[in-house]
């Protein structure tokens, strides 16, 4: 036991190559020679590179012994032009394309020697301009969910589907300006040699972190194909000013023994417990060790590569709570040097105890130590729909009105910042404001995880009618999209999607996960309402002040009866064209009345209908307003010629 502990400690503390010696360029091609470099133990018996004609099968056409040429750094150079060939490294633990392959053959088993074009300047100019993260409306999408059942899709389930007119039109019509794609790096759970069969997986089982997944390309055997098609997708979205956000899963690998990390440097990249077993903060059997210099550098180089080579506009860190704070801050800094508007957010939790203490981890409670990084607010999510631990329990939407739900909803509306009218001791999972700025909070009620909103409402509110379901769905998203945080919706919620009650659909068939596009015609009111909410947010800066002091200055909660949360955005908040905006959210089954300052009001949203016409839905003068059951009301008092105040 003592011996193995010592061995682990040594792995963690080994000297590593300097950044100038090695920055994870494991393969450098030129027409006259190809050079290989690998970070692998200095005491390895042998490290070889094998070159193959194909991405799978066949015998090596050349085997080269690598030489130890630096600190744990092995090198080999092979003369001649090897463009179009494939390679693996082998240091005695099984063949691997290395940890930083940028092109691979089918199923990512071998690296591909490929001359890449590098950056195209014309591309850079097209990166969407996002002044402040609160200006984003994030749409979380799985490629197959979105396009597999779309009748006119030419490339259903592929990257290229997002270059098609129907797809772009839908996104533009809805108004979202950022597409967050579920894992699209090369993952293992879809067999790329069997794409003739429908296969579905979310893809949280990374194989090659720096190569697009082959299953979403039209030809996974051609290493250039997935790269080019991924870039075409980004380019098509950028042309429409839609940002592309990548879901990155550095916190774990599918398993240890077969992972590229383990096969190049055993035990270096994983955290261990004191008894020498692997720590499992990811809940997937392992967790990576971001605090170790080479894992940290790996993550930094990886995000930099996606940001520069593929022009990715944002990163969503899976289980960010497994990574250490310092690494997350290093990543923020590295991305700032490329473009400070690149957005970072993550899940501020882990799925089990981690190998380093919580106070050092990228947990939600530590967000104040990570400026420029946001975390999902499970507080507002569960306040609205009910706790993650029990699908049958409802939240505020279903009529559960204890202090926690109401206060958490208020905190979510304010962007999870300190606010004099919010008592954080009553907030769901945060006993103090976790965000220093509202830009550090992701506002949402549903994502790919857990039940989607429709299923959750059905499961938690027995006997719910379709009418009520729609009313509560729209009410929920009103809270999300008028929040001062960064709004986030799951793809298909605007079509009232369901997943037939499946809670964890990570490998469910298309029949569960696919969008039913008929719903767009079946429930036009739903789509129009989502559209209206997004437009409202975009046209009215009061809903996205982007600064904690401004939120505290302009956002005031109003007295409201049980089941109602009401607030005012006062005095031309954010230089809005509306003077005072009143938002009332009523989840009760009764009409409710609340007192408001006496004024001439124009109502723009009521009873499940939203309009941005200047005459609104109706106008009235008074100091009270009635709000229909299970619905939101939004109105303002700026009829008169406008004066702009700060
Ligand atoms: Ca794959």
Image (tube, helix red, strand yellow):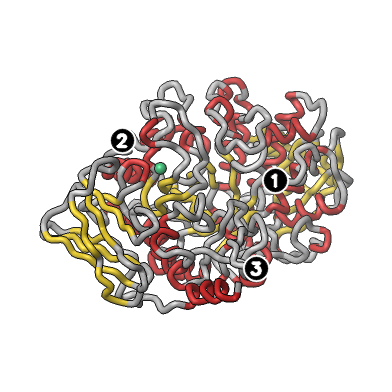
**Ligand 1 under 8 Å from disc 3 Cβ:** no
173 sits to left or right of 121: right
Mark 1 → mark 2, Cα distance in angstroms = 43 Å
When the figure is inspected, residue 229 is found, relative to residue 528, above or below; the finding is below
What residue lies at 66% left-to-right and 51% top-to-bottom?
Answer: 483
305 sits to left or right of 616: left
Q: Which residue is mark 3?
A: 366
Where disc 2 sits, the SS reads loop
Q: Which dot marks residue 479?
A: 1
Q: Which residue is mark 2?
A: 219
What residue lies at 39% left-to-right and 33% top-to-bottom?
Answer: 161
- Assess disc 2: are there few (<14), some (14-19) or many (≥20) residues with their C-alpha within 10 Å of its C-alpha: some
Quadrant assignment for the C terminus: bottom right
Q: Residue 398 lies in what quarter of the image?
A: top right
Quadrant assignment for the N terminus: bottom right
- Assess disc 3: are there few (<14), some (14-19) or many (≥20) residues with their C-alpha within 10 Å of its C-alpha: some
């Amino acid at each position: 036991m003592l011996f193995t502990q010592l061995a682990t400690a040594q792995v963690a503390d080994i000297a590593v190559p300097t950044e100038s010696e090695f920055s994870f360029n494991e393969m450098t091609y030129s027409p006259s020679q190809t050079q290989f470099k690998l970070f692998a133990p200095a005491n390895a018996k042998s490290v070889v590179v094998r070159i193959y004609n194909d991405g799978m099968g066949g015998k090596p056409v050349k085997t080269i012994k690598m030489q130890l040429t630096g600190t744990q750094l092995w090198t080999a150079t092979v003369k001649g032009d090897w463009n179009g060939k494939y390679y693996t490294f082998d240091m005695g633990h099984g063949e691997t394309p290395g940890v930083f392959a940028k092109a691979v053959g089918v199923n990512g088993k071998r690296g591909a020697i490929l001359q890449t074009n590098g950056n195209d300047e014309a591309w850079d100019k097209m990166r969407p301009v996002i002044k402040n993260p609160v200006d984003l409306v994030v749409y979380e999408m799985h490629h197959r969910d979105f396009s597999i059942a779309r009748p006119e899709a030419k490339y259903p389930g592929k990257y290229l589907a997002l270059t098609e007119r129907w797809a772009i039109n839908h996104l533009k019509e809805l108004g979202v300006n950022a597409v967050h794609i579920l894992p699209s790096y090369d993952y293992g759970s879809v067999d790329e040699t069997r794409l003739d069969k429908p296969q579905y997986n979310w893809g949280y089982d990374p194989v090659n972190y720096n190569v697009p997944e082959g299953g979403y390309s039209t030809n996974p055997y051609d290493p250039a194909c997935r790269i080019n098609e991924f870039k075409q997708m980004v380019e098509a979205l950028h042309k429409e000013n839609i940002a592309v956000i990548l879901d990155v899963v550095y916190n774990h690998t599918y398993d240890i023994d077969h992972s590229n990390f383990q096969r190049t440097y055993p035990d270096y990249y994983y955290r261990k417990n004191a008894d020498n077993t692997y720590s499992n903060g990811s809940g997937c059997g392992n967790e990576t060790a971001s605090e170790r210099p080479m894992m940290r550098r790996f993550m930094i180089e990886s995000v930099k590569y996606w940001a520069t080579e593929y022009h990715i506009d944002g990163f969503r860190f899976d289980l960010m709570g497994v990574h250490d704070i310092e690494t997350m801050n290093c990543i923020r800094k590295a991305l700032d040097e490329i473009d400070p508007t690149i957005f970072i957010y993550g899940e501020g939790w882990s799925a089990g105890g981690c190998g380093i203490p919580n106070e050092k981890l990228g947990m939600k409670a530590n967000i104040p130590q990570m400026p420029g990084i946001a975390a999902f607010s499970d507080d507002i999510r569960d306040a609205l729909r009910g706790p993650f631990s029990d699908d049958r329990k409802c939240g505020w939407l279903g009529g559960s009105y204890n202090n926690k739900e109401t206060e958490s909803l208020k905190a979510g509306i304010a962007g999870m910042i300190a606010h004099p009218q919010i008592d954080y001791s009553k907030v769901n999972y945060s006993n103090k404001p976790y965000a220093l700025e509202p830009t550090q909070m992701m506002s949402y009620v549903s994502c790919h995880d857990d039940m989607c909103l429709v299923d959750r409402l059905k499961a938690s509110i027995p006997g719910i009618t379709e009418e009520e379901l729609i009313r509560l769905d729209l009410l929920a998203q009103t809270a999300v999209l008028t929040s001062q945080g960064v709004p986030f919706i799951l793809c298909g919620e605007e079509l009232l999607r369901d997943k037939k009650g499946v809670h964890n659909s990570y490998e469910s068939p298309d029949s569960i996960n696919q969008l039913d596009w008929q719903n767009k015609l079946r429930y036009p009111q739903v789509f129009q309402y989502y559209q209206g909410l997004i437009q409202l947010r975009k046209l009215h800066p009061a809903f996205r002040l982007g600064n904690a002091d401004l939120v505290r200055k302009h956002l005031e909660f109003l007295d409201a009866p049980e089941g109602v949360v009401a607030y005012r955005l006062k005095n031309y908040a954010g230089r809005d064209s509306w003077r005072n905006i009143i938002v009332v959210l009523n989840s009760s089954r009764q009409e409710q009345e609340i007192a408001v300052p006496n004024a001439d009001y124009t109502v723009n949203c009521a009873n499940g209908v939203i309009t941005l016409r200047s005459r609104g839905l109706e106008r009235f003068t008074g100091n009270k307003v009635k709000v229909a059951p299970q619905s939101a009301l939004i109105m303002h008092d700026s009829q008169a010629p406008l004066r702009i105040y700060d």
